[in-house]
Amino acid sequence: MAISQHLLQILARLADGRFHSGTELAESAAISRSAVCKQLQNLDKLGLHYSAISGKGYKLSQPLQLLDEDSIRQALNGNTKALLQRLEIHPCLASTNTYLQHADNAHATACFAEYQTEGRGRRGRQWLSPFGRNIYLSLRYHYQSGPAVIAGLSLAVGVAVIRALNSLNIRDAGLKWPNDIYWQQKKLGGILIEVGGEAEGPCHTVIGLGLNGFLPQPLSQTIDQPCTDLYSIIGDKAFSLRNRLAAELLNQLVPVLHDFDVTGLSPFIEEWRQHDCLHGKTATLYQGKQQHQGILEGIDEHGQLLLRKSDGKQQIFASGEISFRPSHENTA
């Protein structure tokens, strides 16, 4: 859906989580009070809930921190500023990854969106995207080598995300092979990497990251796997650090993407293993219609998954999707 400038102005006023009168909102957006009511009717579609009380006005159920380009740029370190060529923030996109896939010659470009109408996860799954609550980020980067050489990039990106969370004192996040961010065996975020270009020549990558800041309960109940958000981990702080988190993700991701072209995966292997949240767990690996059950034993030097089957033999997998059971059953 299109998000009008009037609605963005209203949201900027409501973002503090306090009551604001209809007259105040009308003045801030330079529209009539009846037009304010019409604009507020769109909030449910964006995954935002509000209260309306006579004599007090309107109030969001939770505070909101809108992404601000100036705040993000001010928090970037010198290395990131030197490497990052473009930074864009959009109120609404179909998908940040799709947008950058079609951006001509967009090298070292970062794109955030407040809201996605067609956000995607692995295997084309929908990525649910309430407005202004989570991080929807894509980075486009060019590599001189072909797609085969950047195998394992999602593991290095996962390491960068953990570094960013740790730098903001968000601890105990883990990595699930090959591209998920977990906290206490619940999904906190996901990585989606798409590659274009020649098989043996230069290629471009679009690295998408979705990170849950706050998932309203009705929305979280529609997700078909255990999930969590930053609000569940650090409480109300999750509402006030969104711009800091956006900047710190760039501070960690951009240098990693730059270095990967030279170093490959090897400098990140041991760090990834330290954050492997499923090592030693029993799980099922799905590859299309094939299923492989066994004990997860981490990754090899190429970032491939190691799985020990019931017959004692270890198998190596370059791709697949892991399914595991809750920890209270003492399995993965």
Image (cartoon, helix red, strand yellow):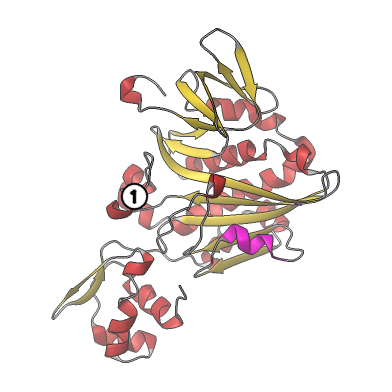
Does 180 appear above or below 246? above
Q: Which secondary structure, mark 1?
A: loop
* Vertical relation: 129 (above or below) 284: below
The quarter of the rendered structure image containing the C terminus is: top left
Residue 173: where, in percent of width, then height?
A: 45, 36
- Of residues 330 and 88, the one nearer the viewer is 330
Residue occupied by mark 1: 222
Q: Residue 188 at x, y = what percent? A: 43, 43
The quarter holding residue 239 reads bottom left
Q: Residue furthest right?
A: 201
Quadrant (top left, top right, bottom left, bottom right) of the N terminus: bottom left
Q: Residue at x 68, y 60 (%)?
A: 101
- The residue positioned 48% from the left and 43% from the top of the image is 165
Q: Based on the displayed image, in which of its 4 quarters is residue 317 positioned?
A: top right
Quadrant hosting residue 227:
top left
Q: Nearer the viewer, residue 156 or 235?
A: 156
x and y percentages locating residue 63 in the rendered image? 32, 63
Residue 110 position, x and y percent, is 63, 59
For the point 39% across and 74% down, which residue is it? 12
Residue 169: tell me if it is visible. Answer: no
Answer left or right for 126 relative to 267: left
Q: Which residues lie in the magenta part?
A: 96-103
In the rendered image, the residue lying farthest to the left is 54
Q: In the visual, does 268 lie left or right of 219?
A: right
Give the residue drawn at x 58%, y 30%. 272
- Amino acid tagged 1: Thr
